[in-house]
Image (cartoon, rainbow, N blue to C red):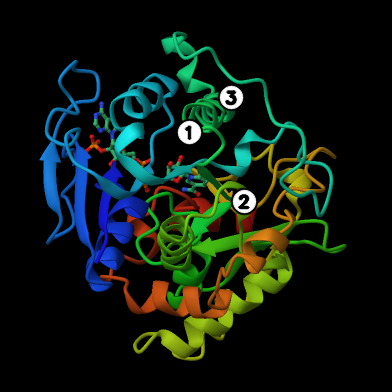
Amino acid sequence: MSKILLLGGTGWLGRTLGLLALEGRHQVTALARGTEAFAQGVDAVVADRDSPDAYAGVEDQIWDLVVELTSSPRFCREALHRLGGNARNWVFVSSCSVYAEQSVPGADETAEVLDPLDPGDGEAEADYGRAKSACEVLSMQARGGRALVVRPGLIGGPGDPSGRSNYWPLRFAESRDPVLVPADPEGRQWVQIIDVRDLAAFILESGLTGHHGFVNAVGVQHTLGQALRLAREAAGAASSAANPEADHELVEYDAARMEADRVAPWAGPRSLPLVLPAGSGYAGFARRSDTRSLAMGLRRRSLRESFEDIVRSDDGSGTGSLRSGLGAEEESELIAG
Ligand SMILES: NC(=O)c1ccc[n+]([C@@H]2O[C@H](COP(=O)([O-])OP(=O)(O)OC[C@H]3O[C@@H](n4cnc5c(N)ncnc54)[C@H](OP(=O)(O)O)[C@@H]3O)[C@@H](O)[C@H]2O)c1
């Protein structure tokens, strides 16, 4: 049994980490304000990291593993200062958003990263990639290089709060016809989703093993067309009710129309989730190297399995409650137009 501290633990990944670590019979403490519920069974330390005594409840203990989930260089620096000396292993959960270029397929962890933000530059923390980049530098410096920086690509799976990975399988599981799908005639668009459960297992295992350095944690690469086909098959296999075959009529939508139709790429309301913005700078997006993570032991379920679990875990709201995608009326309007 190891003693694990999650700095965070109330978000989607943090809760998944907590539950998985408990399943592995570890002792888990999570420090957060408690904006969302803590995972049942973790020792919850309610604290605001903006307050000077935020770490009082956790700083006099020895931790086998600390997992830092923040994107704030200020929080990151203070936690390393207070807890770094008492932690055997330290994982910083970063992001592939730290990379300066998204145009080179197959780029590995040695690719150039964005200039780190100055930790004192509070306002600019909205600059997510540069903030994560600063946290990476702080983590490595404070730990003398003995930190593991995990850079996830797009995280997906059941409960995805962003709505990006769940929109397509849930849409195909609905009986409404036809379904508007983005055309991807030349396979120019790629999708690389890591299931939140596989990511959590990788963070815990590689962190407790004492790996250090930088590692991408990304899913298997699929073209957008393949991913949509898997979503459709998964919906057919997993939905019990309205449309067990997920046998929909499809209407292909030319992404060149998106701007004129005020349809957003990637995520958010009135969007086509997972579709990349127009332009040539994304040829390497969703095509990051996974070589190092596989050598370190990352195990990934198939995208189809993630999609099936998304459909099976739906509470009946379907796409209606997602933060991303098209509403029924928006979709009909685009199909008609
Ligand atoms: N989603 C993706 O596709 C993706 C891709 C790449 C990387 N990532 C990274 O993966 C991680 C996802 O983490 P997550 O799902 O657990 O969600 P999250 O929302 O990023 O987690 C942030 C955690 O920090 C806590 N927190 C925020 N402000 C705080 C404060 N002032 N004091 C104390 N705690 C505070 C939050 O809890 P409270 O609000 O309760 O305080 C929450 O538990 C993040 O590091 C994210 O940047 C995500």
For this rendering, which residue is in front, 272 or 219?
Answer: 219
Q: Amino acid at mark 2?
A: Val
Q: Would residue 38 be seen by someone viewing this image from the given angle? A: yes
Check disc 3: other Cα within 10 Å, few if <14, some if 14-19, many if 20+.
Answer: many
- Does 164 appear above or below 134? below
Distance CA(mark 1)–CA(mark 2) = 17 Å
Q: Amino acid at mark 3?
A: Arg
Splitting the image into four quadrants, where does ligand 1 fall? top left
Question: Is disc 2 placed on a helix, strand or loop?
Answer: strand
- How far across and how far down the image is residue 63, in percent? 27, 47
For this rendering, which residue is in front, 192 or 266?
Answer: 192
Location of the N terminus (image quadrant): bottom left
Looking at the rendered image, the disc whose residue lies closer to the viewer, 1 or 2, is: 1
Residue holding disc 2: 215
Tell me which label, 1 or 2, sits earlier in the chain: 1
Distance CA(mark 1)–CA(mark 3) = 20 Å
Check disc 1: other Cα within 10 Å, few if <14, some if 14-19, many if 20+.
Answer: some
Which residue: 53% across, 58% down?
332
- How far across and how far down the image is residue 93, in percent? 47, 44
Question: Is disc 1 placed on a helix, strand or loop?
Answer: loop
Q: Amino acid at mark 1?
A: Arg
Which residue: 55% across, 48% down?
212
Which residue: 49% across, 60% down?
206
Residue holding disc 1: 143
Q: Is residue 213 left or right of residue 139?
A: right
Q: Is residue 247 left or right of residue 210?
A: right
Tell me which label, 1 or 3, sits earlier in the chain: 3
The reply to whether callout 3 and callout 2 are in contact (CB within 8 Å) is: no
Residue holding disc 3: 130
